[in-house]
Amino acid sequence: MNDGLLSNKQFALLFAILMIPVLIIVLLSFSSGESIYHISFEGFKEIFSSLRLNELLKICIRSLVVSITATTIAYLIAYFLVLNASYSFQSIYLVLISLPFLANESIRVYSWQLLLSEDGLFNNILSEFGSIEVTFFNGTNIVNIYLVMIIACIPFGIFINSAALKMIPKIYWKSAEDLNLNAVNKFWKVGLPLSKSAVIVSFIVTFFISFSLYSEVAYLGGDSKISLRNLISSLMSASKFQSIFCLGFIITFSLVAFILLSKLLIGNKTLS
């Protein structure tokens, strides 16, 4: 008798059901609009055209910068939160950083737009301190987009890294104290090595979250309005539906490949 929540057969069935949309994406990526039995690569040709690659490159670079910054900040916050804050404070803090996500995404980003506009609160504060008119935050650059995307991704990284740090056995922290390791050495030799998997997961999650964010680009402007949703809308308006499925296939394949590569690298470092 299996006392687990799900048996192997039930888990396999659940996995098969979840894989149905992925299989449909793969099938339609290589099928022409005329027949699913006719293989076509027209969708891939569209995605790998210079125009689409340029758009995807800008989205990927933006997501990379956001994910690296958000993961770094989130890990530092999670580290000091788990090691120095009480359990009650941790619970309250995690609840508070979750509250903004209970509001509609467009409403949340529109509120940021008011704060980061040319005559918004942030520029007014900077102007007061500098005694001159400051318009650092405005709709003509991408600072607003990066700032709000990073802030939006940080809570996800905090949750992931906090969970990982809490799972580190207390004996490691006690051993570090017995060895009189200072805060920096304790961070580099105990905390980070034992939670590097969570850092990688946090990077992957925040990368794909920032990759798919849309409202930040739509409301906060910048030098371009390039986003994944706008790219898909452009393909839909041109009736290039196969290209949309090809894009989904490429994203899914990239995610799986990155996860397997990260797991392989972590495994090799552990063995060595």
Image: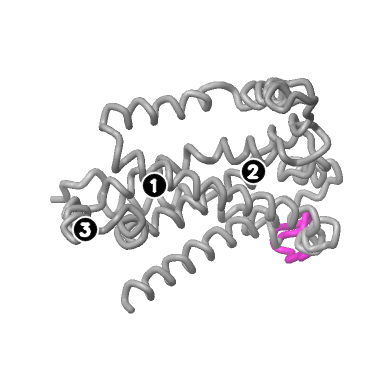
Q: Does label 2 or label 3 sit earlier along the sequence?
A: 3
First to last magenta residue range: 31-41
Residue 176: image x %, image y %?
A: 22, 58
**Gap between marks 2 and 1 measured at Cα:** 22 Å
Secondary structure at badge 1 equals helix
- Which numbered disc, 1 or 3, marks the residue closer to the eye? 3
Residue 127: image x %, image y %?
A: 73, 24
> Is residue 61 within the magenta segment?
no
Residue at x 32%, y 32% (from the top left corner):
90
Q: Which residue is mark 2?
A: 212
Q: Which residue is mark 1?
A: 161
Instruction: Check disc 2 and give the amino acid type.
Output: Ser
Query: Colour mode?
Result: one colour
Depth order, front residue of 221/131: 131
Apparent side of residue 24 relative to residue 158 in the rendered image (left or right):
right
Depth order, front residue of 82/242: 82
Instruction: Check disc 1 and give the amino acid type.
Output: Asn
Instruction: Check disc 3 and give the amino acid type.
Output: Asn
Apparent side of residue 264 relative to residue 170 in the rendered image (left or right):
right
**Gap between marks 1 and 3 measured at Cα:** 25 Å
Secondary structure at badge 3 equals loop
The label shown at residue 104 is: none
Q: Which residue is mark 3?
A: 180
- Which numbered disc, 2 or 3, marks the residue closer to the eye? 3
Number of numbered callouts drawn: 3
- Which numbered disc, 2 or 1, marks the residue closer to the eye? 1
Residue at x 43%, y 25% (from the top left corner):
96
Quadrant of the rendered structure where residue 222 is?
top right
In this rendering, the answer to whether 158 lies above or below 68 is: above
> Is residue 37 within the magenta segment?
yes
Q: Does label 1 or label 3 sit earlier along the sequence?
A: 1
Apparent side of residue 102 relative to residue 117 in the rendered image (left or right):
left
